[in-house]
Amino acid sequence: MKIHEYQAMELFAKYGVPVPKGEAVFDVESAVEVAAGLGSWPVVVKAQIHAGGRGKGGGVKLAKNIAEAREHAKSILGMTLVTRQTGPKGRLVRRLLVEEGCRIAKELYLGILPDRETGMHLVMASAAGGMEIEEVAETSPERIVRVYVDPLAGLLDYQAREVAEGLGLPKAASKQFLGMLKNLFRLYLDYDASMLEINPLVLTEDDKVLCLDAKIDVDSNALYRHPDILAYRDTDEEDPHEIDAFKYGLAYIKLEGGNVGNMVNGAGLAMATMDAIKAAGAAPANFLDVGGGASAEKIANAFHILLSDPNIKGILINIFGGILRCDTLANGVLAAVRETKLSVPLVVRMEGTNVEEGRRILRESGLPMITADSLTDAAEKIAAAVK
Amino acid sequence: MGIFTNEPIRLIVQGITGKDGLFHAQKCAEYGTNVVGGVTPGKGGESIDRWPIYNSVREAKAATKANATMIFVPPANAADAVMEAADAGIGLIVCITEGIPIMDLMRAKRYIADKPVRLIGPNCPGIITPGEFKIGIMPGFIHKPGGPIGVVSRSGTLTYESVFALTNAGFGQTTCVGIGGDPVKGTDFIDVLQAFNEDRATEGIVMVGEIGGDNEEKAAAWIKANMKKPVVGFIAGITAPPGRRMGHAGAIVNGNSGTGKGKLDAFRENGIVVCENLGDLGAIAKQTFT
């Protein structure tokens, strides 16, 4: 789960990690008030959306006085910010962070994340901050320091020193950085972060380190033990269909430009089904994994989510029953078809546990649906039906 | 006998008193697996269906001589269950549980690294040697005993789809292993490929991957350097949109690998027969393995 920059900064502050003085606001007048109250100029007005690249898109501006603060808050609040991470549609800006400016001597990068290949924590740092880290990795990989941290031992002192040395910090700042890195690592662990990133971390002209950015993604599997993170959730930043899916325990991702809704059990098979739909000449409108232990009710909810997409011209259900039994699925599909008075073609393909019973239920229902006996067959039938 | 086992299986089920735990204990027993008991802390001394329940894995092992466990413990306690099984000296640990926090897994994986155990999963369908035993949630009837094909996959239902295609094309399986969909897991492609390479009964391998990470690329390189048997490979998610990645640093660690195209290229460059459309798997198996 993603949280906003200002929320991440609140956590940073709680862990003694230096961040600029500032406050989140929802309207222009509050922005002006906060700016005036910071006590020094310039101040920075920053759009708060769940996507990076805000500066280049015009979502971060420097104000030298009250008039400028007002002007920037006005122009950023309510704008549709398009960055390389938002996609072409962009995001509506509803929140701002107003914070004090500082004199920057050097921009740095720092990130901590679980490394899937080694099963270790990975601390990455680079003296080439401010730039996109992917770009640094490509053009000058030697400028990135990587330290792998054993999950049983935690971040060791010498490893923290390696990171500091890699950043080439002056002595005074280096000492402050070591304390900060330890606190950040503790925060990363305590909150099950799947990513903690600061870009830029800056060295100020008076040789202090300061986080001018804060990004924390939290492992969604661990949210049950972080009620305070759940309270940070901003549903304005999420696709409404995806919110519904989350509520029902379904994994749903909307795909642009598709016309075939599909419902599958298992993430791998769901992807293979999308591939098959495409190979048959149609376009998948979504990824939807109903999971292993789906109930009839869950199937019905999944159906509602698919049908709420106006672009859908047909639906393909592909279930290979393991835990999920085909008769359960069939009953769920029937209930949903009746209740929604389905008006688009439906192709059902199922295989696995209790498949004979499931097929019998569908056959005897008398409802209009097309059955298929393999994935390829199903994909071709739905592609023909939506043409 | 299949891979990852060298003695008859004596299976316990951790979390046997849960709905899924019991259902699949019964299904595994029906398939012919020797299920000898279950573990649920606080319910030791009771029994469920035909099985005794123990408070701990250590107790269960002492009483039943169990050598394998299947874990259905809820996500918050599953990593602990894995470490408990390892400490009790259970050699084969199959963790079915989905949704375990990644940091719990990282600790558990590191904790068991130097112990003589094989962890399969988590978030996986398990392992089956058709006709002998199954430890997992896969539907048994889609498999065909007798080999000669080994199957390894990151996905659950996609494994079933692949196995079913092989069975329908007349190919039996030696062992099928679902290694699981979590980023950090006990057993990787290479572990399974290595075991298939050494297994005399296995004559060919089907490897089912998906987008994300670089396990498939690494496995492909390993295959080129070591594999003595033909391998057919499939990748799910070729049409998945880019931009749904986990974020900055994740993308950089993985570099450009992780895309479906990159994985298929890696397969081709390393001599793996690519199956682009899953519906063609039976036909491709016939061309490759006969």
Image: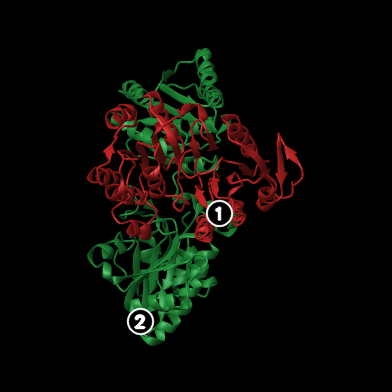
**Residue B61: % across, % down:** 66, 49
With A332 as the anchor, is B50 left or right in this view? right
Chain for mark 1?
A
Viewer-proximal residue among B194 and A120: B194
Q: Which label was assigned to residue A169? A: 2
Is residue B108 visible in this depiction of the protein?
yes
Disc 2 crowd, CA 10 A, few/some/many (<14, 14-19, 20+): many
**Residue A252: % across, % down:** 45, 40
Question: What color was chain A assigned in the picture?
Answer: green
Check disc 2 and give the amino acid type. Leu
Disc 1 crowd, CA 10 A, few/some/many (<14, 14-19, 20+): some
User: Looking at the colours in the rendered structure, which chain would you say is drawn in red?
Assistant: B
Residue at the spot x=53%, y=72% of the render?
A15
- Calculate the distance from the C-alpha at mark 1 to the C-alpha at mark 2: 36 Å
Number of on-image labels: 2
With B230 as the anchor, is A248 left or right in this view? right
Q: Quadrant of the C terminus of chain A?
A: top left
Circles 1 and 2 in contact, beta carbons < 8 Å: no
**Residue B75: % across, % down:** 58, 49
With B56 as the anchor, is A170 left or right in this view? left
Residue at the spot x=39%, y=39% of the render?
B200
Q: Which residue is mark 1?
A: A223
Chain for mark 2?
A
Instruction: Say which quarter of the image contains residue A171.
Output: bottom left
Viewer-proximal residue among A44 and B237: B237
A2 shown above or below A126 = above
Q: Secondary structure under badge 1?
A: helix
Q: Which label was assigned to residue B218? A: none
Check disc 1 and give the amino acid type. Leu
First in sequence: mark 1 vs mark 2:
2
Q: Secondary structure under badge 2?
A: loop
